[in-house]
Every structure is written in C-alpha cells, then in structure tokens.
Image: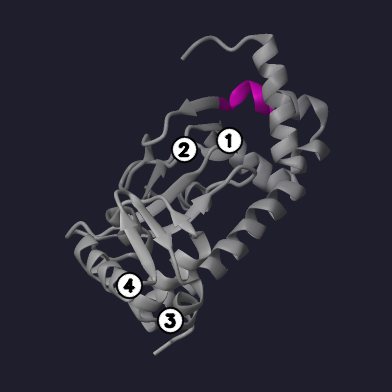
Amino acid sequence: MPETTATDKDASRRQLLARFPVFAALPAERLQRLLGEAQLLHAPAGSVLFDAKQPCRGFPLLLEGSVRVSKTSPNGREIQLYRVEPGQGCILSGGCLLGQTDYSASAIAEQDVVLISVPPALFHELMLQFEPFRRFVFGMYGERLADVMELVEEVAFRRLDARLAQLLVHRGPAVHATHQKLADDLGSVREIVSRLLRSLEDRGWVKLERERVTVLDPKSLAALAANQG
C-alpha cells in the first residue's frame, strides 16, 4: 500500500468522525492513536474481504461503499446474512474477535470500498474502556439480530415467489441484477428464480432483459408479496 501522508491522516480523521460520530467523544490522544494503529484500506468491487475459516485480523469500520456478508453451504448454495453500509461495522468480525474464533461466513465488496480496520488489541481496549464504542457495537448486534430473525422467518415460512415479488417491488421499477444475483439475495438457486421470473413475465407483471428486470405491475406483485401461504 502507498505510504500514508499527514494529509491522508487528516482526511481519514474527518471521514471517520463524519461516519462514526461515536469517536468524537474519544480523547484527542486516543483518537490519534486509533488513526495511527488502524489500517486505512481500499478494495475494488468484487474483492473478497474475508472468507470462512479465516482468522479475523481487525474490526472493520466502513467509510465508503457496500459489503455483502453471506454464508455458503457445501453444495454451493449461498444466502445473504446482511449488508454493511457506510457508518457501520461488521458484527461478524466483532464476534470473531470477542470469541477468538475464525470467520464462519464471507464478505465481498459490492462496490469500491474504503474502510478502517481496528486491530484486535485496540478493539478489545475500546470495548473495555470506552463505553460509547461498547454501546455502538452492542447496538449493532441488536439491529443485526432482528435482521437475522426476519431472514429466518422469510426463509422458513414464506414462499419463494412471494419473497421474490417483495424484492422486485422494493428495488423496482428497474432492478439491475442477474438471475444468479437475485437467487443469492433470496438464498435460492438460479434455476428456480429464473423459472419464477419467467412465470411473472408470462403474467405481464415484469419484463425480462439482460441483467435487468423491469416491474410493469407493482400492484399485482405487492399482492403476491402479501401472500404468506
């Protein structure tokens, strides 16, 4: 990586405080230490930030971009657990650091990302000695737990066609994604999602194009999404 200049450090400080105001309460010398010990990392879209069974080398704080965290089964089926957006940390990384375990899922940059990686020793120190950071981390756990519970309910109890309809309504009217990407988001396989999309197209509810699904009848899709059976 290129050497970090004083200008870079000043920019990192401003960006960190803008995205993570929790650190505004950190004493100046400790904030300076955080910026000195943490790594500022850039990764292009598509980069694997971590993978299952790898050790955790730091607690990432996302400044720019978007990261997808997902779990893959032995047969290759993937399900998205959550996304990390700017101003958020990765709770899986926090759990691995607190429990001293390896990763159990993978993270891929969906867009070009910029993040600050807090080294393990400093992460533990902040958790123990800086209550605002501790509240921030545990608050993220509460939010993610609710997300995962909703995901379990979706996968276990809702029909796939209703979940697909909900996704299309939420992201429409033009959804730019491959059938494989939609299948990954739904925790399904491409063949099933493609068949469901063709069925929706036959009804006149969507139009299928290369890496694009256009919603034509959002009301009908919303009615299907509301069908919990």
Mark 3 or mark 1: whose residue is earlier in sequence: 1
> Which residue has dot 1 on it?
64
Relative vertical location of residue 105 with respect to residue 3 in this rendering, above or below: below
- Examine the residues drawn in magenta and state their main secondary structure: helix
Please state the horizontal and vertical placement of residue 207, each as a whole percent of the image.
Answer: 35, 62
**Could you say whether the residue bearing mark 2 is in a helix, strand or loop?**
loop
**Front one among 28 and 89:** 89
Residue displayed at 57% across by 39% down: 62
Mark 1 or mark 2: whose residue is earlier in sequence: 1
118 left or right, relative to 160: right
Residue displayed at 55% across by 62% down: 144
Task: Specify how the rendered protein is coloured.
Answer: one colour
**Could you say whether the residue bearing mark 1 is in a helix, strand or loop?**
strand
Q: Which mark is residue 211?
A: none
**Front one among 5 and 186:** 186
178 left or right, relative to 82: left
Q: Amino acid at mark 2?
A: Gln
> Which residue has dot 2 on it?
111
**How far apart, in angstroms, are the residues tagged by discs 3 and 1?**
35 Å
Circles 2 and 4, Cβ within 8 Å, touching? The answer is no
> Which residue has dot 4 on it?
200
Quadrant including the C terminus: bottom left
Quadrant of res 14? top right
